[in-house]
């Protein structure tokens, strides 16, 4: 058995050499089959078959949806998303603390999206669903008096933010509950008293 393994081992080593090398074979004095890349008298040549080349399997193309954000697109969904009313740095008066925004989305707001309002970083609980319109009105109630940073935010069905507008600042003016009412503010004005004639005693004075 070892006498057979040695020629096979030699053959494997020779086959592993350069593809263009010539292989020779002969039988030695002990009857063993010998393989070598060096020719000798009486040796026969061995024709080597072309080496099989296995092409690597190409990697599947990366889908535009395969990213760290799951199904969320990599770029902006809306080419135009902005608050058109009120304008930035506007002073508003509402004793009820109501703030109404007009927001434009282009293309129209998707049916799977909600449009919400962010005030000073706090997102409103309710929102306006997409209905195929490009102009939307959102109203937030009972806002404290003072200056606020406001933005409109698009969220998906899972509540994750998709896109938001550039923020604006509004200054809300409303009557404070701690401000005392002015006396007689709701009373009708009284007519001035008629002038009295001189030297005429007042009624009931007894003179």
Image: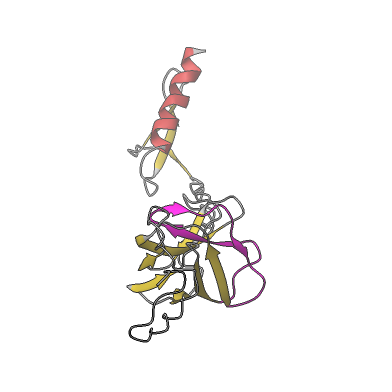
Q: Which residues are magenta?
A: 107-134
**In the image, what residue occupies the spot 41% across and 56% down?**
144
Image-based side of 59 in relation to 182, left or right: right
Where is 59 relative to 117, above or below?
A: above
Percent x, y of residue 184: 44, 66
Q: Nearer the viewer, residue 7 or 157?
A: 157
Where is 158 relative to 139, above or below?
A: above
Q: Quadrant of the C terminus?
A: bottom left
Image-based side of 53 in relation to 171, left or right: right
Is 108 colored magenta in this rendering? yes
Where is 6 relative to 58, above or below?
A: above
Q: Which secondary structure dominates the residues rendered in magenta? A: loop
**In the image, what residue occupies the spot 41% across and 60% down?**
181
Residue 154 seen in render: yes
Q: Nearer the viewer, residue 117 or 113?
A: 117
Counting labels gives 0
Q: Nearer the viewer, residue 153 or 179?
A: 179
Image-based side of 35 in relation to 101, left or right: left
Percent x, y of residue 70: 53, 51
Where is 186 relative to 155, above or below?
A: below
Residue 42 seen in render: no
Is 18 colored magenta in this rendering? no
Quick one: which residue is furthest to the top in this view?
1
């Amino acid at each position: 058995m070892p006498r057979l393994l040695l020629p096979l081992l030699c053959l494997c080593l020779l086959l592993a050499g350069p593809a263009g090398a010539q292989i020779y074979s002969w039988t030695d004095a002990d009857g063993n089959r010998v393989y070598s890349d060096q020719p000798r008298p009486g040796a026969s040549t061995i024709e080597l078959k072309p080496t099989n080349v296995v092409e690597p399997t190409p990697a599947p193309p990366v889908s535009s949806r395969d990213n760290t954000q799951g199904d969320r697109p990599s770029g902006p969904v809306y080419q135009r998303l902005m608050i058109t009313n009120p304008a930035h740095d506007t002073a508003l008066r509402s004793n009820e603390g109501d703030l109404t925004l007009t927001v434009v989305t282009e293309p129209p707001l998707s049916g799977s999206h909600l449009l919400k309002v962010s005030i000073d970083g706090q997102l409103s609980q309710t929102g306006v669903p997409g209905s195929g319109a490009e102009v939307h009105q959102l109203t937030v109630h009972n806002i404290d008096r003072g200056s606020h940073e406001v933005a409109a935010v698009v969220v998906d069905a899972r509540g994750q933010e998709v896109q938001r507008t550039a923020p604006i600042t509004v200054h809300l003016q409303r009557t404070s509950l701690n401000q005392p009412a002015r006396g007689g503010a709701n009373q009708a004005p009284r007519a001035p008293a008629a002038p009295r004639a001189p030297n005429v005693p007042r009624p009931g004075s007894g003179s």
